[in-house]
Amino acid sequence: MFDVLAYLEIASIIIFRYILIAGIAFLFFYILLFKKNIKNKIQERKANKKDFFREFGHSVMSSAVFALTSFTILFTPLAEYTLVYKDIGAYPIWYFFLSIFLALVIHDTYFYWMHRTLHHKKLYKTMHLVHHKSVNPSPWAAYSFHFTEAITESMIAPIIFFILPIHPIAFMIFTLISLMINVYGHLGFEIMPKWFRHTPLFEVINTSVHHNLHHSKFNGNYGLYFRFWDRIMKTEMPNYVEEYDRIQEQRFGNAQEKLKPSRLEHI
């Protein structure tokens, strides 16, 4: 029997979390501190209210789909086939945190290949075009997907549940981190500190500029959290680092030092 109350509880949490995180980002960068952060803005063009309402509407729908997928796995007989464990002591505490990181790695891999597939000409217009209507995305675009893409996006939940031992709280933390990174990727502003450019993390982690280029150019930069797959498969836009440095120079008023090529650049 379908437990309506349990589903509504999950959906409410996901929708509330989306509104809270995307809303705070929107409030600070698009309303309260827009002028103060104008140098951080990646694109000169401006989104409008119509874009924001479209993104919000699709994101709420996507949240409902995400909730249904998780509900179907965790609140039906399928639950006994998952590797979800409820006893926090069943695994060492260090594994609790490791499982969150592993979930991010698994999700990044799944997302990269799913995302590239959705850019195939036979799928793009029917599934992925809705998301790319946000040429200049805002935080509200984090979950702005067509219904069919929302289903595809939500499949990461059963993948993780069936292949990775994970505690429900660890999974919730994973989804929270995922949403926060997603909002950052669609922020429309670069907020990474100046020193980040000169660390090994820059070679590994995506930035808001990285994903914003994907929205403005439509192809390339398919990764979600990491640059790894884009660099391995040579789908990272060749002007990404140059564009990132341009934005940082725009923010801080002095040119970024040119770094020596990293070993990853030879992959």
Image (spheres, rainbow, N blue to C red):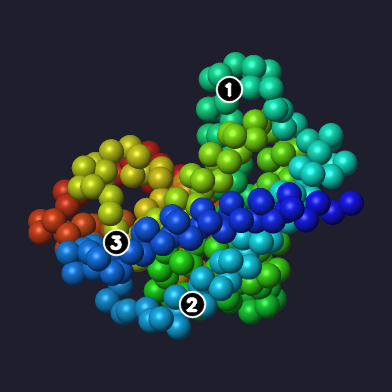
Q: Is mark 1 on a helix, strand or loop?
A: helix
**Image disc number at residue 95:** 1
Q: How many labels does the image show?
A: 3
Is residue 163 placed above or below 152 in the rendered structure? above
Residue 93, quarter of the rendered image: top right
The alpha-carbon separation of the residues under discs 3 and 1 comes to 36 Å
Residue type at numbered disc 1: Tyr
For the point 41% across and 81% down, the residue is 49
The residue wearing badge 3 is: 28
Asked if disc 1 and disc 2 are in contact, CB closer than 8 Å, the reply is no
Residue at the spot of label 2: 53
Please name whichever residue, 266 or 249, is drawn nearer the observer in this view of the structure.
249
Query: Which picture quadrant has residue 240?
Result: bottom left
If you read the primary sequence from the N terminus, does the residue marked by circle 3 or circle 2 appear first?
Answer: 3
**Residue at the spot 36% in from the left edge and 64% down from the top edge:** 26
Among numbered discs 1 and 2, the one appearing first in the sequence: 2
Give the residue type at disc 2. Phe
Answer left or right for 189 relative to 101: left
Mark 3 or mark 1, which is nearer to you? 3
Q: Note whether 203 is above or below 136 in the view shown.
A: above
Q: Residue at x 38, y 81 (%)?
A: 48
